[in-house]
Image (cartoon, grey):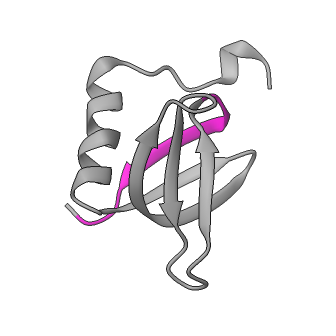
Amino acid sequence: MTPELQMRWSTARYDELEAAAVERRRVALTRRGTEFVIIALRVTMEPTESLVGLLPMTGEEMTFPLGEIDGFHIVDR
């Protein structure tokens, strides 16, 4: 992905994602053209800044490096 197409992570957007993880909210995110709806579990720094979420349909835990996320929004506000 070219740098100009990557999502820009402002402090407010990062805080919004962290709050979603703390509150276990559903997050719809797009990565490489595919949309995922997950339950946010945590934001981690290991090995890189990533969002860890649970796929409600399968129970699978997935890790999404923030640099690969094209966009997101909190589903249940």
Q: Name the dominant secondary structure of the magenta segment.
A: strand
Q: Residue at x 54, y 29 (%)?
A: 49
Q: Position of residue 74 (x, y in %)?
A: 33, 54
Above or below for 22 versus 7: below
Q: In this view, does 13 lie to the left or right of 43?
A: left
Above or below for 20 versus 54: above
Residue 70 forms part of the magenta stretch: yes
Q: Which residue is drawn at 75% across and 45% down?
A: 32
Above or below for 43 versus 30: above
Q: Is residue 71 left or right of residue 15?
A: right
Q: Residue at x 50, y 45 (%)?
A: 51
Q: Position of residue 63 (x, y in %)?
A: 61, 51
Residue range of the region highlighted in magenta in the rendering: 67-76
Q: Where is residue 3 in the image (x, y as percent from the top left)?
A: 71, 14
Q: In which quarter of the image is the N terminus?
A: top right
Q: In this view, does 71 lie to the left or right of 13?
A: right
Q: Residue furthest front?
A: 46
Residue 77 forms part of the magenta stretch: no
Q: Nearer the viewer, residue 29 or 19?
A: 19
Above or below for 63 versus 35: above
